[in-house]
Image (tube, rainbow, N blue to C red):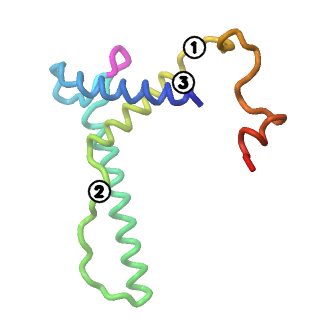
Amino acid sequence: MQRARRLASTAVVAVLAVSGLSACRAEPDVAAYLGANGSITEAEVDNVYDQAFDALTAARDQAQQAGQAAGASAEAVPPVQMPFKQHDVLNALLTVKLLEKAAAAPRAPASPRNGSTRSSTPGPSNCATHCCPR
C-alpha cells in the first residue's frame, strides 16, 4: 500500500513538474513534453475533450428524446456544461503516460525492512486482529 502511495505521489510531482516546464520550449502545438519519450500535443488534448463533449451532447439529446417519447414537454435544453477543462484532460493524459512508464520500469527485488523476514501484511492467521476488529 505504501508503494502505491509513493508511486501516486511521484506521479503527481512529475505531472506538476512537467506542466510547469512545458512552457520552456518553443513548439506552440505541444501541450506538454515528456522528456525523451515524446510529447502530448494540443491536438491530442482537444481530440479527447471534443470526444467527451460529443458523448455528453449525444447522451443529453438521447435523454431528451426519451423524455419526449414518454410525454415530457419539449422545452429548450441548456447547452452542455463540461465538468472539466482542457488542462484537466492534459493532466489525465500526463498521469496515464507517467504511470505506464513507471509500470514498465524494472523493479528491484523486495527486501525485508530492518532485517526482519516476517511479513508486515496481515495473513490468514492474524487477519481477525488487523482487518476485522470486533
Magenta range is 34-38
Q: Crowding at label 2, few (<14), some or many (≥20) Cα neighbours within 10 Å?
A: few
Q: Amino acid at mark 2?
A: Met
Q: Are marks 2 and 1 in contact (CB under 8 Å)?
A: no
**Residue under numbered circle 2:** 82
Q: Secondary structure at mark 1?
A: loop
Q: CA distance from mark 3 to mark 2?
A: 31 Å
Q: Residue at x 40, y 82 (%)?
A: 67
Residue type indicated by callout 1: Pro
Q: Tell me the amino acid under the disc marked 3.
A: Ala
Q: Which residue is mark 3?
A: 103
Q: Residues within 10 Å of mark 1 (few under 14, many from 20)?
A: few
- To which residue does mark 1 refer? 106
Give the CA separation, mark 2 to mark 1.
39 Å
Picture quarter containing residue 120?
Answer: top right
Of callouts 2 and 1, the N-terminal one? 2
User: Does the magenta portion include 9?
Assistant: no
Above or below, comparing residue 14 to residue 116 in the picture: below
Residue 1 occupies quadrant: top right
Residue 66 place in picture, x, y as percent: 43, 79
In the rendered structure, the answer to whether residue 132 lies left or right of residue 1 reads: right
How far across and how far down the image is residue 54, in percent? 33, 57
Q: Secondary structure at mark 2?
A: loop
Mark 3: few/some/many CA within 10 Å (<14, 14-19, 20+)? few
